[in-house]
Image (cartoon, rainbow, N blue to C red):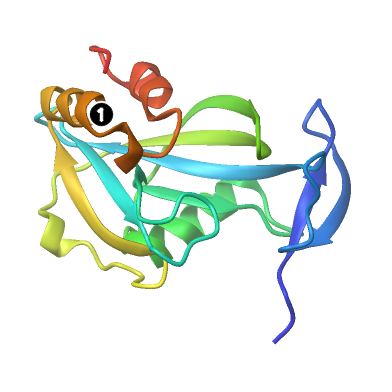
Amino acid sequence: MDKETIIIVNEKDEIIGHKERGTLSQSDIYRVSALWVMNSRDEILLAKRHHTKDHYPGRWGPAVTGTISEGETYGENIVKESKEEIGIKNVKFEVGPKTKISNEYSHFTQWYFLKIDKNVDAFELQKNEVEEVKWFSPEDLRKQFQKYPENFIPRIENYFKLFCKDNV
């Protein structure tokens, strides 16, 4: 099977090329889509990244994230990744903000938001991507993050501030 080709962009999020997954240099900027999921009780659905993932294995992060492949838009990617990773389909996502990360990885992230009431056991997980999903109350997330920050992806606090009334 051919390796996936991902989109490389400039500082303005304009496509400047493509690279095979796994061949990025630290100066490359790529595109990511991410889904922030909450329920009617204002709980946040986080996904524990599979322990074999290259970026932040075994840590809690947004419910869905995906790197944009060649020929794909942010919107197409979030629909595909949501279906593959946690089994969400046939819903309309609200478009959220676009953020840029520049540290050991550089990427633009187009955020999407979904409010849904669903038990964790009703999500269909892609086991090689997501080990588990869990609903966190804002208070529990705050406590867990303060006590065990190493269990979460970096910047989870920033994402919480983007979408939640309270802050971590």
Q: What x and y, as percent, mark residue 163?
A: 34, 22
Q: Quadrant of residue 140?
A: top left
Q: Name which residue lies at 61% across and 53% down.
A: 67
Image label count? 1
For the residue pair 149 and 20, the one nearer the viewer reads as 149
Q: Secondary structure at mark 1?
A: helix
Q: Quadrant of residue 144?
A: top left
Q: Quadrant of residue 128?
A: bottom left
Where is mark 1, residue-wise? 145
Q: Name which residue lies at 21% across and 42% down.
A: 116
Q: What x and y, as percent, mark residue 142?
A: 20, 23
Q: Is residue 125 left or right of residue 111?
A: left
Q: Is residue 109 left or right of residue 47?
A: right
Label 1 crowd bin: few (<14), some (14–19), many (20+), radius 10 Å: some
Q: Residue furthest bottom?
A: 1
* Res 80 visible: yes
Vertical relation: 3 (above or below) 58 = below
Q: What x and y, as percent, mark residue 10?
A: 84, 33
Vertical relation: 35 (above or below) 54 = above
The kind of residue on which mark 1 rests is Phe
Q: What x and y, as percent, mark residue 51?
A: 39, 63
For the residue pair 48 and 95, the one nearer the viewer reads as 48
For the residue pair 43 and 76, the one nearer the viewer reads as 43
Quadrant in which the C terminus appears:
top left
